[in-house]
Image (cartoon, grey):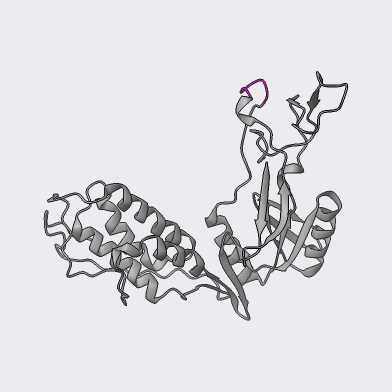
């Protein structure tokens, strides 16, 4: 999947490329078992801030870069070689996925 | 949500997909946690908390405030065709709301408006809870009066968009207020307290 990223004035800033798996061909029980992502309830966040106010806690924030691609796959998933990146002489082979990829059903875990 | 308590510090980590809040009793806890996490994942340190889920967080000498003006602005823009006029209160008691229906108007959109308001109410705006409670009773059959009432809630938010939810360091004491109204429901003479 390719994307152009624009600056606010409309000029092109960078080109972004992203490898996306065809998650819709995955079968439940074969290629994936459960799909969920960690979500804190807004109420919990509010309670934590109330506690932070009373007990004078320090609150800092962090952002995980490319969070989706950090996880290791537990299931065995294969995908076709991406277009334009097919190894000459190995046309019949497929890729075995080790890490999560965008598009996979289990990626947001 | 994960937590760790040692004799030196207590840390609570609150995870929202890829956003993370770290609460700690002292600065050592923060530093330790950050160091450990960056050794495993690629992380970006955003320093002291600023915005989470588009809620602006500010630290004051006596506590924290949460503000959601960005979301409210978006919401007002989405429903600007309602011809929103600014209002000082979220609900007008002189308005008679009936549940027998003369003409149902845009039921689906009404439900969506209630849902949008309810999200703001849950996050930072408990002051509109009463109005939402009243108006959400008519979600299945809204008529033009209900739409007028909901536009007023939007109008109230428009005027008070900069109100923060303030958590103070004052020890938690429950205070309760109650008010009973006498036969305000015009159709069946029920009372609300």
User: Does any portion of residue B14 appear in the rendered image?
Assistant: no
> Which SS does the magenta portion mostly show?
loop
Asked which quadrant contains residue B66, the reply is: bottom right
Give the farthest residue toward the bottom.
Answer: B61
User: Does any portion of residue A96 appear in the rendered image?
Assistant: yes
Q: Nearer the viewer, residue B48 or B112?
A: B112
Q: Is residue B97 magenta?
A: no
Residue at 36% x, 66% y: name it.
B128
Q: Is residue A27 magenta?
A: yes
Magenta residues (range):
A26-31
Q: Nearer the viewer, residue B122 or A31?
A: A31
Q: Position of residue B117 (x, y in %)?
A: 39, 59
- For the N terminus of chain A, the image quarter is top right
Q: Nearer the viewer, residue B83 or B99?
A: B83
Report the side of A53 relative to B112 (left or right).
right
Q: Nearer the viewer, residue B34 or A4?
A: A4
Q: Position of residue B178 (x, y in %)?
A: 30, 68
Q: Position of residue B76 (x, y in %)?
A: 40, 65
In this view, B142 is above or below A102: below
Q: How many marks do you count on the picture?
A: 0
- For the C terminus of chain A, the image quarter is top right
Residue at 64% x, 25% y: name it.
A26
In this view, B61 is above or below B57: below
Asked which quadrant contains residue B134, the reply is: bottom left
Report the side of B87 relative to A22 (left or right).
left
Residue at 78% x, 64% y: name it.
B30
Asked which quadrant contains residue B57, the reply is: bottom right
Q: Position of residue B143 (x, y in %)?
A: 19, 54
Residue at 38% x, 70% y: name it.
B157
Give the farthest residue toward the top.
Answer: A92
């Amino acid at each position: 999947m390719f994307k152009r990223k624009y600056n606010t004035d409309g000029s092109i800033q960078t080109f972004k490329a992203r490898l996306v798996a065809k998650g819709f061909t995955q079968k439940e029980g074969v290629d994936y078992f459960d799909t969920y992502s960690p979500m804190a309830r807004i109420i919990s966040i509010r309670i934590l801030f109330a506690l932070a106010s009373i007990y004078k806690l320090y609150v800092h924030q962090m952002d995980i870069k490319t969070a989706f691609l950090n996880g290791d796959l537990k299931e065995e998933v294969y995908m076709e070689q991406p277009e334009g990146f097919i190894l000459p002489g190995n046309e019949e082979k497929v890729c075995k996925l080790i890490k999560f990829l965008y598009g996979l059903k289990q990626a947001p875990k | 949500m994960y937590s760790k308590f040692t004799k030196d510090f207590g840390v609570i980590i609150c995870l929202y997909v890829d956003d993370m809040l770290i609460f700690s009793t002292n600065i050592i806890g923060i530093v330790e946690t950050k160091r450990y996490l960056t050794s495993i994942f690629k992380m970006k340190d955003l320093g002291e908390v600023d915005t989470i889920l588009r809620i602006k967080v500010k630290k004051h000498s006596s506590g924290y405030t949460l503000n959601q003006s960005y979301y409210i602005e978006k919401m007002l823009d989405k429903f600007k065709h309602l011809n929103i006029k600014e209002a000082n209160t979220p609900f007008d008691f002189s308005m008679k709301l009936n549940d027998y229906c003369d003409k149902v108007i845009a039921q689906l959109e009404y439900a969506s408006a209630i849902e949008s308001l309810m999200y703001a109410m849950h996050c930072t705006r408990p002051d509109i809870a009463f109005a939402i409670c009243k108006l959400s009773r008519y979600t299945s059959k809204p008529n033009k009066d209900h739409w007028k009432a909901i536009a007023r809630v939007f109008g109230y938010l428009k005027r008070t968009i900069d109100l923060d939810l303030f958590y103070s360091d004052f020890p938690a004491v429950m205070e309760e207020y109650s008010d009973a109204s006498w036969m305000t429901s015009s159709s069946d003479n029920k009372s609300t307290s």
